[in-house]
Structures are given as structure tokens and as C-alpha cells.
Image: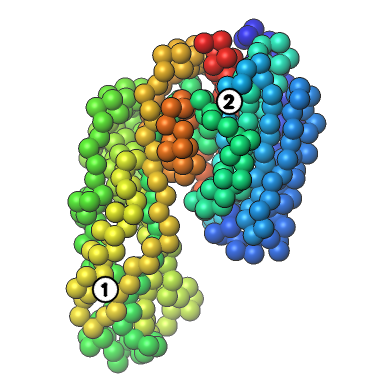
Amino acid sequence: MDNKKAADFIGKIWDDSIIPQLCEYIKVPNKSPTFDPDWEQHGHMQRAVQMLAAWVRQQPIKGMQVEVVSIKGRTPVLFIDIPGASDEVVLLYGHYDKQPEMTGWADDLGPWQPAIKNGKLYGRGGADDGYATFGSLTAIRALQEQGVPHAHCVVLIEGCEESGSFDLPFYIDLLQDRIGSPDLVVCLDAECGNYDQLWCTTSLRGNLTGTLRAEVLTEGVHSGSASGIVPSSFRVLRKLLSRVEDESSGKIKTVGLFVDIPKQRTEQAKKAAETLGKSVYTKYPWAVDAPTPSESPYELLLNNTWRPTLSVTGADGLPALVNAGNVQLPYNTLKLSFRLPPTCDGNVAAKAIKDTLESDPPPMSKVAFQVQSTMAGWNAPPVAEWLEASMHKASQAFFGKPSMYMGTGGTIPFMGMLGEKFPDAQFLVTGLLGPSSNAHGPNEFLHIETGKRLTACVAQVIADHYAR
């Protein structure tokens, strides 16, 4: 592959076609089904997937077949089949569903309002994960433009990833014969430590979500009348949370959630920490000036990728401040999100957490922890020599620096499914969610130059896969 020709071609496609299409895609509020239970009636999901399918059909790719596959009551998938010069299969994956709006967007930005500033495309879903369809197809097209052979490519874009991919197994079963047995999986839905080189994800944490409810009354009563006699439902929750998390350090207390960290992953974390330095933590929008964590960047990376953590992501039973009268609340409910080590069994973790929270409830209170979902983590198999060499080659060619490895604190359920189904496959899990890109939060952006370079790197790896 002629690197300069590929970079020029890909850059032009991004500027002339992909960016305008991503702007239109950002305008569509196709929130994942967990956040929009009435997604079918609203029609945004169909609008988004049909928009992507229409763009794909316009691409002059030899022999390509494009289909929006729908199972009644489940978010549709975009399935693209591209014949190649060999029967080996490369599976390229992404998703098109989005997280909810979130508050805190800058005055001139908004979740459904695309804006380009300083080489960044702002708006919900552009970086997570609208670009995956465009990047995958453009990488393949760049090879065909130069007559560079590639294997049989299958592109699968789902609409339920942000909800835990609960629709996806039904489509995997339905499309199993058409997917075949991929020996290379390319996932464009991951993070990058910086925007200076190709980052390859080696592991993903699992996710356990549930609601913790503490109930003390059947209805609210005057706080002056009840306080001191009736326990505060919020205090009950505080006490319960202390069973599973040290409130001073944030360390999880439940032993069953920890695993032994493989030596290779600690070595990779050390190299990543040396490369990233303080940016491991300075990349976040801190409320305090000059934050100084008590742990080293290396330990922080391990905390984020191989150790369990707890986040409280929502609450019910707390009135808005404007409606907060002097009332002893009857109950409070918190939504808990546990990130689990990549090799931790989510069902075992769920039982351990439920037993810890529900056993021996605090006096005069009812307690219930309702598990909502468990999503498996993923630990990559050993990297084949050809793939490691190809990733370094691609990163040097299009970024001018060697590729790097890192674990990721988030979850991509499909990777766990694929890891179990295709244990012999190689994985290139990568993406452009770098410092401050803020997926799921306000002011999410896509780093345009990184998108172009990442697309070229994917093209190089697909070419090397065929030539190996």
C-alpha cells in the first residue's frame, strides 16, 4: 500500500463525505433502548441506521452487499458483506446507538447540535460510535483504490451497545452462517491514550449495574416530627455503601470482585504510564486546581483497567431542590455501576454484592439490591507476531510514533461474546476516544485528524492480514 496515496485519499473522503454525514448523524437523538424505551415509536433508531446504510450503498466497493437486518422488537443492525481475495474473514464492528444528552454542555454546543472547532467535531455519538461505519468502509475502499488485496470482510454495526448489547446475541445467531469464523476482528469503539500514536486495547472491564433501595416509611412525613425516631433512608444507604466501598480511598471491600492481574498487563501498564505521565489524570475536567492523586500514574491505570470500582450514576426519591420541603423521605434509591476486572465472573460478582448489601439490613429499614445487568469483560489473547508488527508499522507510517498497548476501563460487551465464540481470532480493538473527548458526558468530541490516521492504520492492518 502506498502510504501517501492512502493518507491523501482517506483525508479527502473524511473532509468531503464523512464529516458532513457525521454532522447529520449527530442531529439524530437515537438514544440506546435503555434510555429510550419507546425507541420504536420515536423512529430515531431507524432513521439513524437507514442514514448510515444509504451512505454505505453509495461507496464504490466491489461486490458489496448491504442490509439492515431487523428482528421484531429489537434494534436493527447494519450488516455489510464484502467479498475478498481469500475466504478468510475479517470482522469489523461498531455501533450507532447513543448515550443520553447529559447536562453541562458549553453554551455554544449541544448533544444534537454538531459543531466543528479547532479540528474537533462536537456532538453526541460522533466519536462513540458513529465514525466506525465510515472508518471501516473507507479503510477497505482505500485498499481497493490501489488494487491491494484483502480478505473477505464483514462489517457489523449494532444499535444496542450502550445498553449492554442485549439485542446482539439474537443477531449473532441469525447471521452466524454469513459471519463465518473471523480470524481477525477490528473494533472501532475504544480509547486512545493520546492523539499521537495508534493505541491497541488489550482488555476491557466488565460492568455490573443495579439499583439499591432503602425504605423506611410508606409515605413522607414532617422531618421535625419524625427525625430522631425514624432513620433517614439516605443514612441507611450511606451505611450500606460503606459495606462494599471504602469511602476514604474508593477501594472496593468485596473480596470476590478482585482477580490476579496478568504480568503482561502490568508491564504494558508501566509502559503506558511512562508515555502518558500526568496526563493519565490531568485529562479530566477537575473541579479543583492542580489535582494531585496519592497514587502513581501506573497504579491509577491499574485501578482504571484491572481493579473493581463503584460509581453512583443516578438517584430516585430525592426531590429537586426547589421542591425539597422539610419532609422525612420514605425511601431513596441509587443506581450503582460496578466496573469489574476483565476476567471477573459478572454473575459471581452480582451475587457477592447482593449478599453483602441485603444481609442483616440496618434496623427499621427494608433494603433491596436489584441487579439490572451484568456485562462480561474481555482480556485479549496473545498478539500474533504479524499483527504486532503491522500495528507498529501502521503507527509509524501514519502517526510517526510506535503503537502502544493499554487496558480500557469501559466495557464493550461484543468483545466478550466474540472472545468466547472465536477463541483463535486476533483482535485490533482501537479507537479515537482520547483525552477530554468525554464520551457519555457533555461536550463529547471526535478528533478529526486522529480519525483520518486511524482509518489509514486499519487499512494497513487489513492489507497485512492478507499478505501475512
Residue 128, quarter of the rendered image: top right
x and y, in percent, of residue 135 in the image: 64, 29
Residue 256 seen anywhere in this rendered image of the structure? yes
Characterize the local packing of mark 1: few (<14), some (14-19) or many (20 or more) Cα atoms within 10 angstroms. many
Residue 307: where, in percent of width, then height? 28, 43
Residue 112 image offset from top left, x and y in percent? 66, 50
- Badge 2 element: strand
Nearer-the-camera pick, 455 or 105: 455
- Quarter of the view holding residue 102: bottom right
Q: Which of marks 1 and 2 is nearer the N terminus?
A: 2
Q: In the rendering, at what x and y percent does residue 340 appear?
A: 33, 47
Q: Mark 2 belongs to which amino acid?
A: Val
Which mark is drawn over residue 89? 2
- The residue that appears at 34% across and 51% down in the rendered structure is 346
What residue do we see at 28% from left, 25% from top? 264
Name the residue furthest bottom: 225
Q: CA–CA distance between discs 1 and 2? A: 54 Å
Residue 88 - label: none
Residue at figure coordinates x 48%, y 30% from the top left:
429
Amino acid carrying label 1: it is: Val
Farthest-out residue, top = 2
Examine the rendered structure and indicate whether residue 420 appears above or below residue 241. Answer: above
Q: In this view, does 197 lie to the left or right of 211?
A: right
Q: Nearer the viewer, mark 1 or mark 2?
A: 2
Give the secondary structure at mark 1.
helix
Q: In which quarter of the image is residue 236?
A: bottom left
Q: Label 1: which residue?
A: 236
